[in-house]
């Protein structure tokens, strides 16, 4: 199956978990996009922040992780779910 | 940004470790108290870091929005400059020169953006996006925003001079009307007031024709209105598509589709194929349009980055400052007459457009963490 645009794929991933941080998302999508040069932490942060700015996911909490890095957790909201069901190909949303 | 935050966290944790190991803590209670204190400190510093990151994110977003406005103002002026050179000079008919200039501009902007995306390893995203609904929405939006609106914008500037620039900035007003019609979004009092102010500014500019040098003033104003309509429609369609795509990719699709439609549809329809060919072969105007295309690429890129960082409303209002920049640059580089009514109208429309796109209070309100 051809891959989805990566930002849409991140949103779809968010619909499969209660909440997730950037590393969770990267781990989950590594098998699909891991070989591409765009697969960077900076880009994933950008995807999360943009999805948040567009009102499709919410930041639920944040903390300092073991390395002392700021780590944000996000969760999809109703608008995000609606957007996925409306605009993503059915073959992706049904499984 | 993240690296700086990390470094600050390391400094904080380093200081805490120093406290723990270097200081002589004789009793267990003392150690425990210190532990609780440090945990509180750590939570507080995480909050401070987050706040700092949010502030920086917002500041950058606003800066990008302003850059997008400035570069769009530059683009408008630079393209107009190119149209004053051979082979554009003295072309018969109102449409050929602006259409050929836009076609080259958008195609070159798409090429600039393609290079940018190849550099960032995102090139495969274009194909992936075009087979999804959001990607198609962006492509449809491109047709309204590119060949229709942008073409009309340049024809308007060609006919009416600098006065066309503020008129085209009525696009948020039309955007609000279309959003009311198609997306069933409400028009509240603030938006309605902003729309009213826009109309007053537009009426002011259109009513007083600048003396001498400007042919077809009224027709130019009408074309600028068509541009505003087209950009309003683009906004509505783009809203469907943009949020799920990487903005770099959305912009590349936009400029690419626009360039292709210009070259494949509009240039043949308006019989501008010969002009297109001779323009491609002339070094001086091509270099000028290549610079304009670079400004276009930067403008759209920073605009969508701003939209994604501070929200579409604030991003759109910062972008709309192109009206003021455009009028100022047109006066400086093109020698356009700046009548008091054009200046007053430009300021009034900018204020009205700001009011349509955003609640002024949002600018001062700090976003919640």
Image (cartoon, coloured by chain):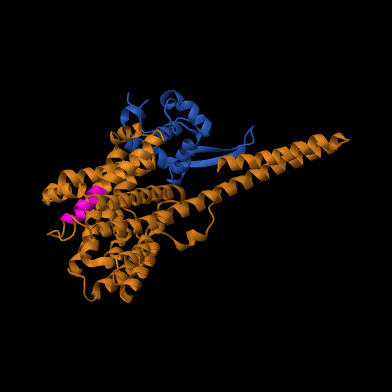
Chain colours: A blue, B orange
Q: Main secondary structure of the magenta part?
A: helix
Image quadrant in which you'd find residue B93: bottom left
- Does the segment drawn in magenta span residue B76? no
Residue at 25% from the left image edge and 53% from the top image edge:
B285
Left or right of A66: which side holds B190?
A: left
Write down the region rendered in magenta: B96-104
Q: Residue furthest right?
A: B26
Left or right of B285: which side holds B304?
A: right
Above or below residue A35? Residue B274 is below
Q: Is residue B25 visible?
A: yes
Image coords of residue B87 (percent x, y) = 18, 55
Residue at 75% from the left image edge and 36% from the top image edge:
B17
Q: Nearer the viewer, residue B116 or B275?
A: B275
Quarter of the C terminus of chain A within the rendering: top left
Residue at 47% from the left image edge and 40% from the top image edge:
A46
Image coords of residue B298 (percent x, y) = 38, 49
Q: Residue furthest front?
A: B283
Q: Nearer the viewer, residue B55 or A9?
A: B55
Image coords of residue B322 (percent x, y) = 36, 60
Left or right of A7: which side holds B8?
A: right
């Amino acid at each position: 199956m051809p891959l989805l645009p990566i930002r849409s794929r991140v949103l779809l991933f968010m619909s499969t978990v209660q909440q997730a941080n950037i590393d969770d998302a990267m781990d989950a999508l590594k098998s699909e996009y891991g070989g591409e040069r765009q697969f960077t932490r900076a880009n994933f942060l950008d995807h999360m922040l943009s999805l948040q700015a567009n009102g499709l996911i919410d930041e639920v909490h944040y903390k300092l992780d073991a390395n002392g890095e700021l780590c944000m957790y996000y969760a999809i909201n109703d608008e995000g779910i609606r957007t996925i069901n409306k605009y993503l190909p059915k073959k992706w949303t049904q499984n | 940004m993240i690296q700086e935050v990390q470094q600050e966290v390391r400094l904080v944790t380093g200081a805490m470790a120093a406290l723990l190991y270097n200081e002589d803590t004789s009793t267990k209670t003392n150690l425990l108290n210190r532990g609780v204190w440090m945990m509180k400190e750590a939570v507080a510093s995480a909050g401070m870091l987050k706040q700092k990151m949010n502030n920086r994110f917002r500041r950058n977003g606003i800066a990008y929005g302003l850059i997008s406005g400035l570069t769009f103002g530059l683009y408008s002026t630079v393209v107009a400059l190119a149209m004053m050179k051979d082979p554009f000079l003295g072309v018969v008919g109102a449409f050929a020169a602006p259409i050929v200039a836009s076609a080259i501009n958008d195609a070159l902007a798409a090429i600039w953006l393609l290079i940018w995306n190849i550099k960032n390893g995102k090139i495969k995203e274009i194909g992936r996006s075009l087979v999804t609904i959001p990607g198609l929405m962006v492509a449809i939006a491109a047709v309204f925003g590119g060949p229709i609106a942008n073409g009309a914008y340049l024809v308007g500037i060609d006919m009416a001079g600098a006065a066309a620039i503020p008129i085209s900035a009525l696009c948020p007003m039309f955007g609000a009307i279309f959003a009311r019609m198609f997306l069933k979004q409400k028009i509240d009092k603030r938006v309605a007031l902003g729309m009213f102010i826009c109309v007053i500014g537009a009426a002011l500019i259109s009513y007083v024709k600048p003396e001498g040098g400007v042919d077809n003033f009224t027709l130019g104003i009408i074309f600028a209105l068509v541009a505003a309509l087209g950009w309003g429609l683009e906004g509505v369609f783009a809203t469907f598509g943009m949020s799920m795509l990487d903005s770099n990719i959305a912009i590349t699709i936009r400029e690419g589709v626009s360039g292709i439609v210009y070259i494949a549809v509009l240039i043949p329809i308006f019989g501008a194929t010969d002009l297109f060919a001779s323009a491609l072969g002339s070094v001086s105007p091509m270099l000028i349009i290549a610079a304009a295309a670079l400004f276009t690429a930067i403008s759209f890129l920073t605009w969508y980055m701003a939209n994604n960082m501070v929200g579409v409303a604030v991003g759109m209002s910062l972008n709309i400052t192109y009206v003021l920049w455009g009028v100022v640059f047109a006066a400086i580089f093109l020698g356009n007459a700046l009548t008091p009514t054009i200046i007053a109208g430009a300021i009034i429309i900018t204020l009205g457009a700001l009011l349509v796109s955003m609640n002024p209070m949002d600018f001062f309100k700090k976003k919640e963490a």
